[in-house]
Image (spheres, rainbow, N blue to C red):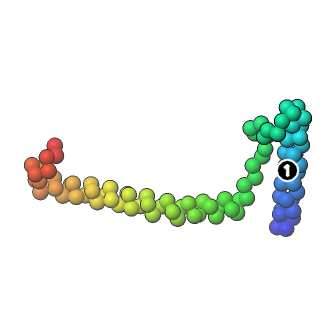
């Protein structure tokens, strides 16, 4: 397990060195301080942080979706009740 962390850290360091070299090359070519081309930088996303973020999003979004689903179900059920009692005339529904 510790070997994986060391390997990931070494890979991140290599990526940072490559990105720095790409940035230096581009500065020399363009003579400017612009950012490197799109796709030149590799984005590293920590898997543990990604799982944590997705869990937080699930906890925020799921209750809202369930409330909306429940309200739609109750609305449909109430309209069915109205139709079964013959209240179509009073609600101007076709």
Percent x, y for residue 27?
A: 87, 37
* Side of 15 where 92 appears, left or right: left
* Side of 63 where 72 appears, left or right: left
Percent x, y for residue 42?
A: 78, 46
Q: Is residue 30 visible?
A: yes
Looking at the image, residue 13 lies above or below residue 20? below
Q: Is residue 26 visible?
A: no
* Side of 10 where 67 appears, left or right: left
Hey, which quadrant is residue 73 in on the image? bottom left
Hey, which quadrant is residue 76 in on the image? bottom left
Hey, which quadrant is residue 3 in on the image? bottom right
For the point 75% across and 39% down, the residue is: 39
Disc 1 designates what residue? 16
For the point 78% across and 44% down, the residue is: 41
Percent x, y for residue 63?
A: 45, 63
Q: How many marks?
A: 1
Question: Where, quadrant-wise, is the N terminus in this rendering?
Answer: bottom right
For the point 16% across and 43% down, the residue is: 94
Kindly state the secondary structure of the residue where label 1 is placed: helix
For the point 89% across and 40% down, the residue is: 24
């Amino acid at each position: 397990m510790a070997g994986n962390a060391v390997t990931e850290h070494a890979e991140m360091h290599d990526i940072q060195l490559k990105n720095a070299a790409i940035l230096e090359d581009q500065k020399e070519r363009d003579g400017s301080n612009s950012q490197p081309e799109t796709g030149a930088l590799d984005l590293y996303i920590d898997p543990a942080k990604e799982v944590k973020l997705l869990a937080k999003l699930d906890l925020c979004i799921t209750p809202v979706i369930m409330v909306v689903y429940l309200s739609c179900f109750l609305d449909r059920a109430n309209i069915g009740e109205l139709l079964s009692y013959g209240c179509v005339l009073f609600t101007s529904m076709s």
